[in-house]
Image (tube, helix red, strand yellow):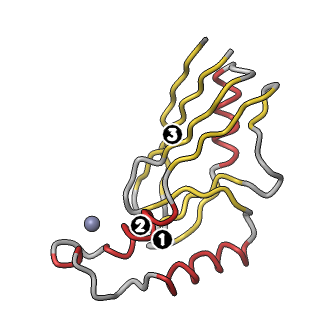
Amino acid sequence: MKTWFKELSFSTNKAREVIDLTGRVTSAVRESGIKNGLVVVQLPHATASLALNENESGLKRDLLEQLNELVPVRGDYQHDRIDDNAHAHLKSAFIGSSVALPIVDGRIVRGTWQNFLVIEQDGPRTRRLAIFVMGE
Ligand code: ZN
């Protein structure tokens, strides 16, 4: 069995936004040469999250707005005593930061509307995305 690892770098441009990294993830898996196995995609950050969902402008706005309904930017948060981004940590904790998916015949098994979306909540900044592939 072979393993392969790559870390992508990308920038976010706003405090809160949704960025689609599907093209870069699928290219990385192709580059790995592994045709059947597993890919783990991990966003190593505590104030952004990774979700599999549709890259549609209305839905991306809905995601940001509904997250903000759930956890407003300004609130009575303990973490804001030492930092100013408690809301971003909470949203990241609720959504999660990694996914593991099968690779079959060279393709990542995912739904038509399941794009790799990074949900930034504490930008703009430079972020990384780690991609680990194992298989044959
Ligand atoms: Zn913080």
User: Residue at left 51%, top 39%?
Assistant: 8
Label 1 to label 2, Cα distance in Å? 5 Å
Instruction: Name the quadrant containing residue 109.
Output: top right
Which of 49/22 is in front?
49
- The vertical placement of 46 against 86, above or below, is above
- The vertical placement of 63 against 43, above or below, is below
Which of 22/99 is in front?
99
Q: Amino acid at mark 2?
A: Gly
Label 3 to label 1, Cα distance in Å? 19 Å
User: Residue at left 69%, top 20%?
Assistant: 34
Q: Amino acid at mark 3?
A: Leu
- In the picture, measured across the screen, residue 31 lies left or right of residue 131, that is right
Identify the element where label 1 is drawn: loop
User: Residue at left 71%, top 27%?
Assistant: 30
The residue to which callout 2 is attached is 123
Q: Is mark 3 within 8 Å of ligand 1?
A: no
Q: Position of residue 67 (x, y in %)?
A: 53, 78
Identify the element where label 3 is drawn: strand
Q: Position of residue 87 (x, y in %)?
A: 37, 76
Mark 2 neighbour class, 10 Å CA radius: few under 14, some 14 to 19, many 20 or more: some
Figure quadrant of the C terminus = top right
**Circle on res. 8:** 3
Residue furthest out toward the left: 82
Q: Position of residue 9 (x, y in %)?
A: 48, 44
Badge 1 or badge 2: first in the primary sequence: 1
Q: Position of residue 60 (x, y in %)?
A: 66, 72
- In the picture, measured across the screen, residue 41 lies left or right of residue 23, that is left
Instruction: Name the quadrant containing residue 1.
Output: top right
Q: Amino acid at mark 1?
A: Lys
Q: Is mark 1 within 8 Å of ligand 1?
A: no
Q: Are marks 1 and 2 in contact (CB under 8 Å)?
A: yes
**Circle on res. 14:** 1
